[in-house]
Amino acid sequence: MKKFEFNLQPILNLKEQSEKIEREKLSKIMADIHLQKEKLNNLINHLNEILEKNNKEINEGTTAIKIAEYDAYVKKIQQMIEDKKNLIKKLEKDAGIMRENLLKISKEKKALENLKEKQYSEYQYLLNLEQNKFIDEQVSFRVAKSY
């Protein structure tokens, strides 16, 4: 009997490769999300420090120009924080889409693997039948030869 050959092996290989690529993309975007969240936390901490410093200077007495400068700077930091939050939301949305793609590819790959396993089991069964038939023929031949 010929060697077992899964006729959909190229497709299975493609699915495995696609799954690997999607995992790498997802890993990269998750690392980017983590980095952006760290930057967001740093901006929030910086904003809090600026606000504290501003309040301290107002209590101690400062010029209107200095207050206006702080106000403009605070607004700039707040805008940067808002931009970071929007970026993180976009990245998380992209990560969700990638997770869905990865899940779809994984299911397709698993279905192909199950089919391959089923076909291999059938192959093993047929191989066993063929071997048993050969053994029976050999035994029958020897028994017939001995008479």
Image (cartoon, helix red, strand yellow):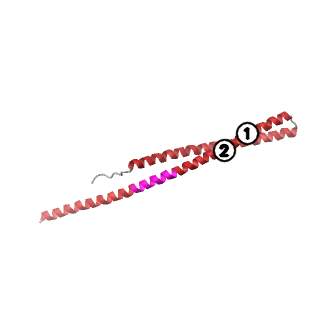
Q: List x then y, in percent, for residue 54.
A: 81, 39
| Figure check: 69 above or below 136 | above
Q: Residue furthest left?
A: 147
Q: Quadrant of the N terminus?
A: bottom left
The foreground one among 7 and 124 is 7
Residue type at mark 1 is Ile
Q: Which residue is mark 1?
A: 77
- Residue found at x 55% / y 48%: 98
Q: Which residues are magenta?
A: 102-115
Rendered image: mark on residue 86: 2
Residue type at mark 2 is Asn
Q: Quadrant of the C terminus?
A: bottom left
- Residue found at x 54% / y 51%: 100
- Residue found at x 45% / y 45%: 17
Q: List x then y, in percent, for residue 33.
A: 61, 44
110 within the magenta span: yes
| Figure check: 39 above or below 6 | above
**Do the residues under discs 2 and 1 have CB atoms within 8 angstroms?**
no
Q: Residue furthest right?
A: 61
The foreground one among 60 and 19 is 19
Foreground disc of the pair 2, 1: 2
Quarter of the figure with residue 60: top right
